[in-house]
Amino acid sequence: PLAEFDLRDVAYRVRSPTSHELELPPAGSGTAGTEGTAGTAGTAGTVALRFPEEREAQQWWTVLSSSLREARRGGTGTRGQRWGH
């Protein structure tokens, strides 16, 4: 992967029913980059996600939000897992 980020450090925003954003932490902050694979420019920035249909956006949100909640809660099996970008 080009970069890896701990799910606990990722912010997710719904901008509209078909437009979502992932805000990624700067490379090297927190646990991002602890394995030397986080970004090359020092900042990760924001990733805009645009979906052709509201239903697809809702499915994405359901999967991602449950993963983010579990990672932040520190549930069994999520510690140390990273979401690569």
Image (cartoon, rainbow, N blue to C red):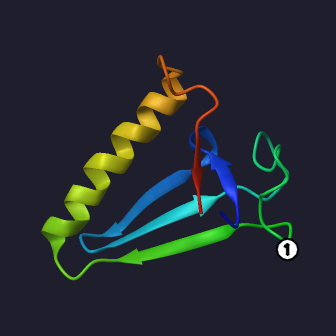
Residue depicted at 64% across the width and 59% down the height: 24
Query: As drawn, is 64 to the left or to the right of 78?
Result: left
Q: Residue at x 84, y 71 (%)?
A: 40
Residue 44 vertical placement versus 59 (above, below): below
Q: Is residue 25 above or below residue 81?
A: below
Which image quarter holds the N terminus? bottom right
Query: Residue 14: which quarter of the image?
Result: bottom left
On the image, the x and y values in percent for residue 32 come to 75, 47
Residue at 86%, 66% in the rendered image: 42
Left or right of residue 59, residue 78 in this image: right
Residue 85 rendering spot, x and y as whole percentages? 59, 63
Q: Is residue 78 left or right of residue 19?
A: right
Could you say which is closer to the camera, residue 4 or residue 25? 4
Q: Which residue is mark 1?
A: 41
Amino acid type assigned to the residue bearing label 1 in the image: Ala
Which residue is more in the foreground, 74 or 78?
78
Q: Compared with residue 36, is residue 18 higher up or lower down, i.e. above or below?
A: below
Residue placed farthest to the bottom in the image? 52
Occupied quadrant, residue 66: top left
